[in-house]
Amino acid sequence: MGSLTSIGISGLNAAQIGLTTTSHNITNASTPGFSRQHILQATQNPQFTGSGFIGQGTQISTISRAYSQFLGAQLLNAQTRANELDAYSTQIKQLDDLLADPTAGLSPALQDFYNALQSVANDPTSIPARQSAISSAQSLAGRFNSIDDRINEIRGGINGQIASSVTAINGFATSIAELNQRIALAQAAGNQPANDLLDQRDQLIGQLNGQLRVTTLSQDDGAINVFVGNGQPLVVGNSAFRLGATPSPDDASRTEVTYQAPGGTSLRLREDTLSGGTLGGLLAFRAQTLDPAQNALGRVAVGLSDAINDQQALGQDLTGALGGNFFAAPSAQALPGAANDAVAAATLSVTLTNPAELTTSDYNLSYDGSNYTLLRLADNQSWSAASLANLPPPGNPQGFTLADSATPPATGMQAGDSFTIYPTRNGAHNIAVALTDPRAIAAAQPMRTTAATGNAGTAAIDAGRVTSTAGLPLAASPGGDITLTYDAVNLVFNVSGGPGGTLAYDPATDAGGKTFSFASPGGFTFRINGAPVNGDRFTISANPQGVGDNRNMLRMQQTQTANLLVGNTTSLQGAYAQMVSDVGNKAHEIDATNASQQTLVTQVESQRDSFSGVNLDEEAANLLRYQQAYQASGKMIEIASKLFDTLLALGH
């Protein structure tokens, strides 16, 4: 009877464990990351007799969890990409809303400024119109400043979120390391899987992967090692390493991620090695959208100030003086590397030379002791030269020139020195209006042309255009004039004053118009057409009474539609519109991709849940099944007891 009783007891134990496991599944049906558990039941070793092997009941060999490593890996990949896109989408929507705002954007202020310039051109003697132009310029500069300030606020917000993400990553790493130790101890003691602990660890790895894409490697003792970046270990066994979020030593306004290596060494992690998750999305948005957008905005500011200042310098104000700067011109920035030689204390001078050649990229300049290397960070295009004068290379200009300082105590760049160059990053922040006196707007040109009243031919000279003010203004007296007198015999204009010499002009071929240029004094281009006769005269002279002259203001107003940027292919308004379009298109792309990725996550989660999740209907059926098995085993023990009682009765 003992064998029958023990068999029944084994059945009771198995059914009880089955009931307990099923109850555990039911109560954890809503627990995140929980994998359905089930018992693996097997027969006990049978007893050999002369009649054969007699069964000895059942046993529970293990309790396993329904877990698919393949589906788990798929879900991790889908979730880390979804979190990356979600973080990117959240940030780019802020930037898109800022730039595309029809009232707070740059376009209205830019249009108002040029409308004010047109008003000055319409009435160059009007002080109110001139004051309005200065006020509109100040509003435009203020709009540049405010948009740039908002971009910097977004940048500051990203810095804070990077720090928060790194803190979360470190917390998950510590928890995973602790679970590694508990799992190793639990499984070593009973040689059975610690299912609930394994689920908890998988859940933590999923949450860690939601912050930053990681790779994992399982160990023989049940521990999982976790790696980030280019393979830097974040968790090894029961040891957790830490990431840091610190201001970049090369640019304090930029938070970067560091790896705290054993021994206390802090290593800077390259941003392009940190992908996936919230942290990867923040870093990708900053590098791929925020930096280029701020640089593009700065480039528009540089292009505007350069064009207006250049034309202002070619003009003459109401007092008769040559024009000074209209805008305080933005300048480039060069930040020394943290590892630069402190004794040499080299400084780098970056001079903006041509806005049309400026890109929206940042640059890095390094020196190895023999050659300088300039790296364009947007596409990793690099150029090397033995002299800074050849960087950027003449054949591929970037809109700026470089020079290092050797003024004591600085001694120039040393081997190993580097600089981060921001040609346009601060353009929108630094632009300001230099003029305060409305009379100082140079609406007139400092030179004028006139035809002698006695000219008998049909020739005419246009108003001309000043291209350089070197050597100007011409003296207001007749002695400072340049006179062109036509010689019909030799078919030339004899030039007296100025550069002197002659200008060939044949009415037979040139009557439709011929353009001439003087390089000194000043730079001056003019056009003559028609048929002069012998003795006809034209005069180029100073313009002391040119208060009503609007020629320079018209030229200034034309910079609105001139192609000044992107290799002289795009206007100021066009460059800004392109920037807004780029950000808007990227925002739409990220939003669409994010929606698609979220759908993918839902699909993979459904597949995972179908395999690992708890089905309450199935578990309810299991309860009935194990209940019946328990009752049947109990009945078996009851029968064994009655049989034993019968044997005892026979003995009496």
Image (cartoon, rainbow, N blue to C red):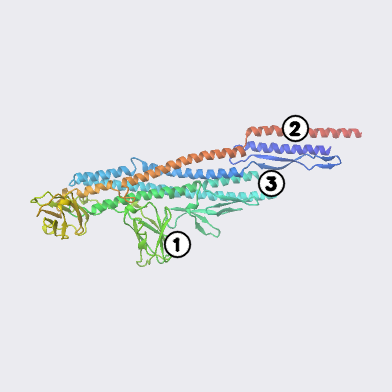
Q: Quadrant of the N terminus?
A: top right
Q: Which mark is residue 400?
A: none
Residue beneath label 1, please? 339
Residue at mark 1 to residue at mark 3: CA–CA distance: 53 Å
Tell which circle, 2 or 3, labels the residue nearer the N-terminal end. 3
Residue 528 in view in this figure: no
Which kind of residue does numbered mark 1 sit on?
Ala
Provide residue 550's location: percent of width, then percent of height. 19, 48
Assign a secondary structure to mark 2: helix
Tag nearer the camera, 2 or 3:
3
Q: Residues within 10 Å of mark 3 (few under 14, many from 20)?
A: few
* For the residues bearing labels 1 and 3, Cβ distance under 8 angstroms: no
Residue beneath label 2, please? 631
* For the residues bearing labels 2 and 1, Cβ distance under 8 angstroms: no
Q: Quadrant of the C terminus?
A: top right
Which kind of residue does numbered mark 2 sit on?
Gln
Quadrant in the rendering for residue 396: bottom left
Tell which circle, 1 or 3, labels the residue nearer the N-terminal end. 3
Q: Nearer the viewer, residue 603 or 271?
A: 603
Residue beneath label 3, please? 192
Quadrant in the rendering for residue 342: bottom left
Horizontal placement of 456 versus 162: left or right?
left
Q: Nearer the viewer, residue 264 or 597?
A: 597
Q: Residues within 10 Å of mark 1 (few under 14, many from 20)?
A: few
Tell which circle, 2 or 1, labels the residue nearer the N-terminal end. 1
Image: 549 above or below 263:
above
Assign a secondary structure to mark 3: loop
- Residue at 44%, 42% in the rendered image: 589
Tag nearer the camera, 2 or 1:
1
Which kind of residue does numbered mark 3 sit on?
Gln
Provide residue 227's location: percent of width, then percent of height. 56, 52
Quadrant in the rendering for residue 402: bottom left
